[in-house]
Image: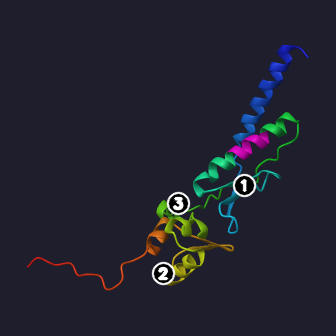
Amino acid sequence: MPANAIIGAIMDNERRVAEILARPYSFIAVADQDDGGWVVFYPDLPGVMTQADTYEEVAFMAKEALELWVEFQVEDGRPVPEPTFEADPDWDWDTVRPTSEVPTMTTAEVAEELEISVPRVHQLARSREVGERRGNALMFSRKDIDAMRIRQPGRPRREKTAV
């Protein structure tokens, strides 16, 4: 195969990969309660799966897994399914919560941050009515974690007011 044909084929593949990656594929991230971290997969793309240690890494790891999978599919001449996700036109952006209130941390991550046991995290969550159930997982926001921090014993002191 002449060099020009090889270069043309490579450029065609790169263009095809870029077109596919521009499609709106959705991924799902599920908290792994047994091992900690997150499992990420694409429902429309069989075999595209990865893991992330923290919630902050989820998007990066998902993008990396998608890019690698698409590159291999295109290189091997295999088809890539179209995304089935359709944006909801009735989405209410006013219901979006501030980042500090979005549950992103697993029970194990909270236990590590607060330097307490997982059962103690569950006790505090119940007593302080914090955390949000996602399937079998109990997830926590920054606001929830602040509510679970150890408090000083006794009654709070009154602030002295000027007379």
Q: Position of residue 69 (x, y in %)?
A: 78, 43
Gap in angstroms between the C-alphas marked 1 and 2: 37 Å
Q: Which residue is mark 1?
A: 85
Q: Position of residue 134 (x, y in %)?
A: 65, 71
* Label 2: how many Cα within 10 Å (few below 14, some 14–19, many 20+): few
Gap in angstroms between the C-alphas marked 1 and 3: 18 Å
Q: Label 2 sits on what residue type?
A: Arg
> Start and end of the magenta stretch?
64-70
In the image, taking residue 150 as reference, residue 2 lies left or right, namely right
What secondary structure is found at the residue carrying circle 3? helix
In the rendered view, tell whether residue 28 sits above or below residue 130: above
Examine the rendering and report whether any part of residue 106 can be seen.
no
Which label was assigned to residue 101?
none
Label 1 close to label 3 by CB (< 8 Å): no
Q: Which residue is mark 2?
A: 128
Q: Which residue is mark 3?
A: 93
In the rendered view, tell whether residue 7 sits above or below residue 159: above
Look at 83% across and 36% down and name the residue there. 74
Gap in angstroms between the C-alphas marked 2 and 3: 29 Å
Q: Label 1 sits on what residue type?
A: Phe
Work out which residue is located at the far right of the displayed protein and give it: 1
Magenta segment, principal secondary structure? helix
Q: Label 3 sits on what residue type?
A: Trp
In the rendered view, tell whether residue 7 sits above or below residue 76: above
Q: Position of residue 72 (x, y in %)?
A: 82, 38
Quarter-of-image position of residue 17? top right
